[in-house]
């Protein structure tokens, strides 16, 4: 479509908002509730500045990783402490904005929140309330094109999360330890990698700009694997929101003394 006017002129002149008779409003409503609850929880936790680290078992919640504020517990700060300790700056303020932008510009989440929050459109074959449609051709939505760069940042942060999960196998006394917290941290980081690798940008970085797959057999094989994972991107997007919240809540509960970690070794 060449312009907004052309797009509007092409629309069918049907007075009903939709001819759909199924419960088309259910997915956007579920997304609205799910995303709102998650963002509320994550915001509260990011600014709480306590119960983020279990010193005895080296458990650090991903919401505070890497912990780089001067307010961080020394043992939790695996990459140094240099950000000022003020209430309005999360302890992981160095990386949280990139993770937020990675998810905000994600192809799947865009679909979810355009439908759930902006009703643009709320569902297939349901007219949107807005009069004009400019797509992602103008600021600020033009910035959605930066997704590929946030993917690189998210991949680096996944390496940091992996390092945290490995360090958590070492107890405060320096020995090997294994508890339910380790299993939760491990499952979370594996799923975070699956979500990150299943990214559409990752798929095009690996398999894009090639004229002949036959001349790049390794990239072709990797592209096939990423493509398989890519079909599960939506499920991974939601699963990782759940595992992030569960991991954070479990570590908060142990750090606060509400529950004890279920220990298997150490
Ligand atoms: Fe969803 Fe890249 S498309 S993370």
Image: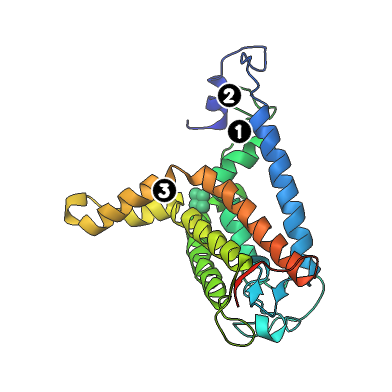
Mark carried by residue 133: 1
The x and y percentages for residue 94 are 64, 73
Is residue 242 positioned above or below 74 on the image?
above
- Is the C terminus in the top left, top right, bottom left or bottom right quadrant? bottom right
Asked if disc 2 and disc 3 are in contact, CB closer than 8 Å, the reply is: no
Q: Which residue is mark 3?
A: 229
**Which residue is at 75% across, 47% downward?**
37
Mark 2 or mark 1: name the one nearer the start of the chain.
Answer: 2
**75 versus 252 height, above or below:** below
Q: Earlier in the sequence, mark 3 or mark 1?
A: 1
Secondary structure under tag 1 reads: loop
Q: Are marks 2 and 1 in contact (CB under 8 Å)?
A: yes
Nearer to us in this view, 203 or 147: 203
Query: Which mark identifies residue 8?
Result: 2
Instruction: Kindly identify the residue that appears in the image at 56 percent across and 57 percent down.
Output: 102
Task: Pick whichever of labels 2 and 3 is earlier in the sequence.
Answer: 2
Q: Residues within 10 Å of mark 3 (few under 14, many from 20)?
A: some
Q: CA distance from mark 2 to mark 3?
A: 37 Å
Secondary structure beneath label 3: helix
| Measured Cα–Cα span from mark 2 to mark 1 | 8 Å
**Of the residues tagged 2 and 3, which is closer to the observer?**
3
Residue 107, given in percent of the width and then of the height, sits at 52, 45
Tell me, yes or no, if residue 119 can be seen here: no
Question: In the figure, is residue 200 to the left or right of 249?
Answer: left
Of residues 79 and 182, which is closer to you in this image?
Answer: 182
Residue that appears at 44% across and 56% down = 197
Q: Is residue 3 above or below residue 23?
A: below
């Amino acid at each position: 479509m060449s312009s907004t006017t052309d797009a509007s002129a092409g629309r069918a002149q049907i007075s009903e908002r939709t001819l759909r008779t199924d419960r088309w409003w259910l997915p956007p409503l579920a997304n609205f509730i799910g995303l709102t609850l998650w963002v509320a929880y994550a915001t509260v936790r990011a600014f709480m500045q306590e119960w983020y680290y279990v010193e005895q078992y080296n458990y650090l919640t991903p919401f505070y990783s890497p912990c780089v504020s001067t307010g961080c517990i020394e043992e939790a700060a695996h990459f140094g402490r240099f950000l000022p300790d003020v209430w309005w700056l999360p302890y992981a303020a160095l990386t949280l904005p990139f993770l937020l932008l990675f998810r905000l510009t994600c192809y799947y989440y865009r679909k979810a929140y355009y439908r759930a929050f902006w009703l643009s459109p709320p569902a297939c074959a349901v007219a949107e309330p807005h009069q004009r449609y400019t797509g992602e051709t103008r600021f600020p939505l033009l910035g959605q094109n930066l997704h590929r760069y946030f993917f690189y940042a998210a991949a680096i942060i996944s390496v940091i999360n992996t390092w945290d999960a490995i360090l958590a196998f070492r107890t405060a006394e320096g020995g090997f330890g294994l508890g339910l917290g380790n299993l939760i941290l491990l499952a979370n980081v594996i799923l975070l990698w699956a979500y990150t690798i299943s990214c559409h940008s990752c798929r095009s970085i690996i398999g894009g700009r090639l004229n002949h797959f036959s001349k790049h057999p390794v990239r072709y094989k990797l592209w096939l694997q990423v493509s398989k994972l890519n079909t599960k991107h939506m499920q991974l997007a939601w699963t990782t929101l759940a595992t992030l919240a569960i991991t954070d809540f479990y570590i908060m509960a142990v750090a606060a003394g509400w529950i004890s970690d279920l220990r298997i070794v150490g």
